[in-house]
């Protein structure tokens, strides 16, 4: 009797470039129309992850019963040690005085540009706000506004796609992300997201800056500052990240040299800023990179035939995870926020090959 695939991990292994035979063909048949006596029918499939070659894997949809129980958050903010016999206090949300790097906050009666108003509300960057305005998705006091440069006061009622928005006080929060959490603000499949980890941290609506894969751990910044978020994720600013990479086998000197020189992948040239071997068995590496391409670290090593078994972001934009245990978070200090605001501000050109 022919054995069938039992799980997605078996399918991932059998779909590698070294596999042959029926296992590979059965993998590609999943999710494709199949003939039956009544004609064509389509099997439902869902994304199961990626194989060693970093290609997506799809499998049969698992039946979901009644509504899942709400996720119980096992994590919390960093607790500060108090006096013996007293309860430990969690870190309080700080108030930032950023007047040193920006003009005095306008009063309610003073007018500001509409795109700045939207960015200050944490919706998006100013440039993206201009796009929303041009598309007619912004209304002021019930009137659709498409004029760039239009000014509003803080007393005006502004809506974006039907939802009322108001400028919020800025919040900056740093999380040491654990595995098995998805970097998204909402997941239709009701899986665990990073928003569960910072639930209750503040009243303001936060969103992650960039993303980390489900199985990638380490630093993840949250804020409602749309303008800063756009700057930290834009390739022109060349924001550097440092990762600790664990491979499934020792890396050769030739491959280390090749990666340092730059690697051309399917989406173009990728250059690294530094690569160092950290362990005697040559499986643990330190990688400094500024590229923000999707799954770039895993794809970089997969190009040379290595599988990344563990990936941890230890530094992001000059911030480190020192004193932040896995699954914990803390608010940035005022000094750290000012540093981010000025980081690579003069860089306005893309990196050349």
Image (cartoon, rainbow, N blue to C red):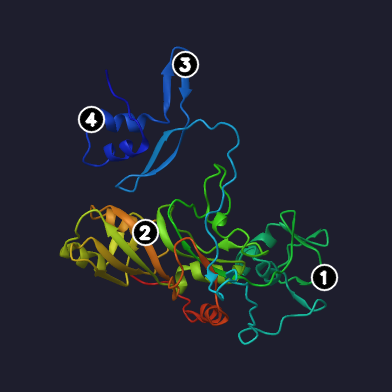
Q: Residue furthest top?
A: 37
Q: Nearer the viewer, mark 3 or mark 2?
A: 2
- Figure quadrant of residue 297: bottom left
Q: Which residue is mark 1?
A: 155
Q: Percent x, y for residue 22?
A: 26, 28
Disc 1 to disc 4, C-alpha distance: 68 Å
Disc on the earlier residue, 2 or 4:
4
Q: Secondary structure at mark 1?
A: loop
Disc 1 to disc 3, C-alpha distance: 62 Å
Q: Which residue is mark 2?
A: 296
Q: Which residue is mark 4?
A: 21
Asked whether the residues under the numbered discs 2 and 1 touch, taking CB atoms below 8 Å apart as contact, a structural biologist would say no
Disc 3 to disc 4, C-alpha distance: 27 Å
Disc on the earlier residue, 1 or 3:
3
Disc on the earlier residue, 3 or 2:
3
Q: Nearer the viewer, mark 3 or mark 4?
A: 4
Assess disc 1: are there few (<14), some (14-19) or many (≥20) residues with their C-alpha within 10 Å of its C-alpha. Answer: few
Q: Secondary structure at mark 4?
A: loop
Q: Which residue is mark 3?
A: 39
- Figure quadrant of residue 85: bottom right
Q: Secondary structure at mark 2?
A: helix
Q: Percent x, y for residue 264?
A: 29, 60
Q: Residue at x 24, y 53 (%)?
A: 248
Disc on the earlier residue, 2 or 1:
1
Give the numbered dot on residue 11: none
Assess disc 3: are there few (<14), some (14-19) or many (≥20) residues with their C-alpha within 10 Å of its C-alpha. Answer: few
Disc on the earlier residue, 1 or 4:
4
Any part of residue 48 in sight: yes
């Amino acid at each position: 009797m022919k054995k069938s695939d039992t799980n997605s991990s078996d399918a991932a292994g059998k779909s590698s470039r070294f596999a042959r035979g029926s296992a590979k063909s059965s993998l590609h048949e999943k999710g494709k129309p199949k003939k039956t006596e009544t004609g064509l029918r389509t099997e439902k499939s869902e994304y199961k992850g990626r194989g060693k070659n970093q290609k997506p894997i799809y499998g049969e949809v698992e039946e979901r019963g009644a509504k899942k129980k709400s996720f119980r958050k096992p994590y919390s903010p960093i607790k500060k040690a108090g006096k013996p016999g007293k309860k430990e206090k969690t870190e309080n949300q700080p108030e930032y005085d950023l007047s040193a790097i920006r003009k005095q906050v306008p009063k309610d009666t003073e007018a500001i540009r509409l795109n700045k108003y939207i960015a200050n509300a944490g919706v998006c960057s100013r440039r993206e706000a201009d796009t929303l305005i041009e598309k007619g998705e912004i209304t002021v006091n019930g009137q659709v506004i498409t004029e760039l440069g239009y000014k509003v006061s803080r007393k005006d009622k502004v809506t974006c796609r039907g939802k009322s928005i108001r400028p919020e006080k800025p919040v900056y929060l740093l999380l040491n992300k654990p595995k098995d959490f998805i970097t998204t603000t909402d997941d239709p499949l009701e899986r665990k997201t990073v928003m569960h980890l910072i639930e209750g941290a503040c009243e303001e609506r936060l969103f992650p800056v960039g993303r980390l894969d489900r199985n990638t751990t380490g630093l993840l910044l949250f804020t409602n500052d749309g303008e800063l978020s756009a700057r930290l994720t834009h390739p022109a600013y060349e924001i550097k990240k440092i990762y600790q990479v664990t491979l499934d086998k020792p890396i050769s000197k030739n491959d280390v040299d090749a990666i340092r020189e730059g690697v051309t992948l399917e989406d173009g040239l990728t250059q690294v800023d530094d690569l160092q071997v950290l362990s005697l068995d040559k499986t643990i590496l330190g990688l400094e990179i500024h590229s923000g391409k999707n799954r770039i670290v895993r794809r970089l090593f997969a190009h040379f035939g290595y599988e990344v078994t563990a990936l941890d972001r230890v530094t992001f934009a000059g911030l480190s995870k020192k004193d932040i245990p896995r699954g914990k978070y803390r608010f940035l200090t005022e000094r750290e926020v000012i540093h981010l605001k000025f980081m690579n501000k003069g860089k306005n050109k893309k990196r050349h090959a």
